[in-house]
Amino acid sequence: MIEKDFLAERRDLLLWPLAAALLSAAAPLRAAEPVEGTPFSRRTVPDLARTLAARAFRPPAAVPDELKKLTREQYRSIQYRKDLAVWGRAPTRFSIEMLAPGFLYRDLVEVDVVENGRARPLSGDQSSFKAPSEAIAKLLAQAGRFAGFRLNYPLKRKDTADEFLTFQGASYFRGHSRGQRYGLSARGLAVDVAEPGGEEKPLFRHFWIERPPAGADNIVVHALLDSRRVAGAFRFGIYPGKPLTMDVETELYPRTALRHVGLAPLTSMFLFGPMDRDGIQDYRPAVHNSHGLAMINGQGERIWRPVSNPTTLQISQFMDKSPKGFGLVQRDRNFSRYQDLEARFDRRPSAWIEPRGDWGPGHIQLVEIPSRSQGNDNIVAYWRPRDGLKTGQPFTYAYRLTWPDDAPAAGPLARVVYSAYSRAAETENRRVVIDYAGDAMRPGTKPEIEASVSPGQLVRKTVRDNPQTGGVRIFITFNTGDAKSAELRVQPKMNGEALGETWLYRWTAE
């Protein structure tokens, strides 16, 4: 039985007093029940991660097989009862709703609430969820735990709690700011993404959620991360609003050396857009949750790299030292660029990572995976430290994650607001058009265009005013010969100083 497996797993680990206390929690609990709980402090989860890393990895308990077989429609019909939301009737402005296990979400996670310095576990029973059948309700009660949770907070009205952040599946979490809809996801950690031997996906196996004081506008969530080769502790300081802001502190404890590890990973979807519409038969001009990777490197250079849906796996590395920021960005907020009344891609959030402290040498890695469906997340971006993680050596880092509409502004520096690709009039040549807008590049500006294509050659550079955007349009015509791919770089300058973002792109043969 699931409960028996769970107890055996916890006895084997014998990690710390809280684990022993949880062993006695065999009966379903409500958050409001008077349970004494166990002591909890800021060091509880890091200490647990260190102890966990000293032992071999054991997968978390899995859901009953029948729940794994649920269809998407059956799973979506399962709803946590709103009247059972944790702190739903308390003075705090936050509340928690649990997410059911089943379908794609097959690992059972543990969730504790922390009040007055003591942690108490949450578990479910047959009345926790509104299920499509009594049989499914019984299976959920048998599981006794959850696949994750969502946080609510009054974003629009003071008397209405709005969902704004969800933790569910491996180490994934999704958020949105006021006025946005869910889109791309963040992750706790990425390991061996796109490696020939396959990706290792760490998971959050246990959460602790601190109850905020009445009237507080922030909440703290702690998470215990685990996988075959690494354990870790995460602390999320969460501030909903516009934008949603999350201060993340992390301690990793590798069981073995990790050469390929990704910090602050972001995962998104890109199906097609103006740069790659060849063969697309769709009434919508673009379909994506993010259409560019924005970066501010250690030297302060601002970079914009449109992402793509390639025909073969593409991996790009942007070497750097002490990056100032990076993120997957949904820059265009005009409905006419998407024409999707249901998905509303114009309201999907961006995600921006701002490292805290010195992250040292490494590179931002962008992975673009071929996809034929808008249901697939095929874009991944993260920071990869040059030296990876070493066996038995703790690794700490921190960053701020925000969910804005765009990357942070840089004063008058112009941004890329549109770029597209086409064949030039001469069939052997290609052409890209790049629109810049901002105080530094208004109509009448005559920028110097530094451009390169490798391999290949530049054929022509043309600059025109664009009164529609209040900026400047640049045409780059190039020829790649027989090359299957080429790297393009364009940067507008004046007297040697940058006027706008550096535009990068990997062209691949159709």
Image (cartoon, helix red, strand yellow):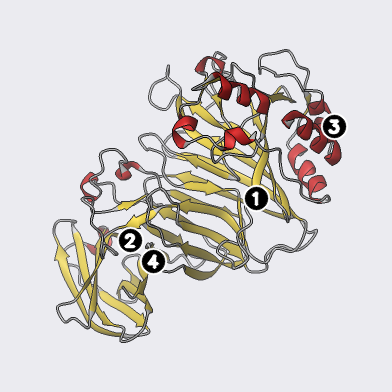
Q: Which residue is mark 3?
A: 17
The nearer-to-camera label among 4 and 3 is: 4
Image-quadrant location for residue 60? top right
Q: On the picture, is 162 further left or further right than 508? A: right
Q: Which residue is mark 1?
A: 202
In the image, residue 38 above or below residue 89: below
Amino acid type indicated by mark 2: Leu
Q: Position of residue 481 (x, y in %)?
A: 30, 86
- CA gap between label 2 and label 3 equals 55 Å
- CA gap between label 3 and label 1 equals 24 Å
* Mark 2: secondary structure: loop
Q: On the picture, is 503 further left or further right than 422? A: right
Q: Position of residue 500 (x, y in %)?
A: 32, 65
Residue 238 seen in render: yes
Neighbour tally class for label 4: few under 14, some 14-19, many 20 plus, Cα within 10 Å: many
Amino acid type indicated by mark 1: Pro
The nearer-to-camera label among 4 and 2 is: 4
- CA gap between label 1 and label 4 equals 27 Å
Determine the residue positioned at 23% across, 53% down.
282
- CA gap between label 4 and label 3 equals 51 Å
Mark closest to the chain's N terminus, 1 or 2: 1
Q: Nearer the viewer, residue 202 or 441?
A: 202
Mark closest to the chain's N terminus, 2 or 3: 3
Q: Which residue is mark 2?
A: 413
Mark closest to the chain's N terminus, 4 or 2: 4
Mark closest to the chain's N terminus, 4 or 3: 3
Q: Position of residue 413 (x, y in %)?
A: 33, 61
Amino acid type indicated by mark 3: Pro
Q: On the picture, is 274 further left or further right than 214? A: left
* Mark 1: secondary structure: loop
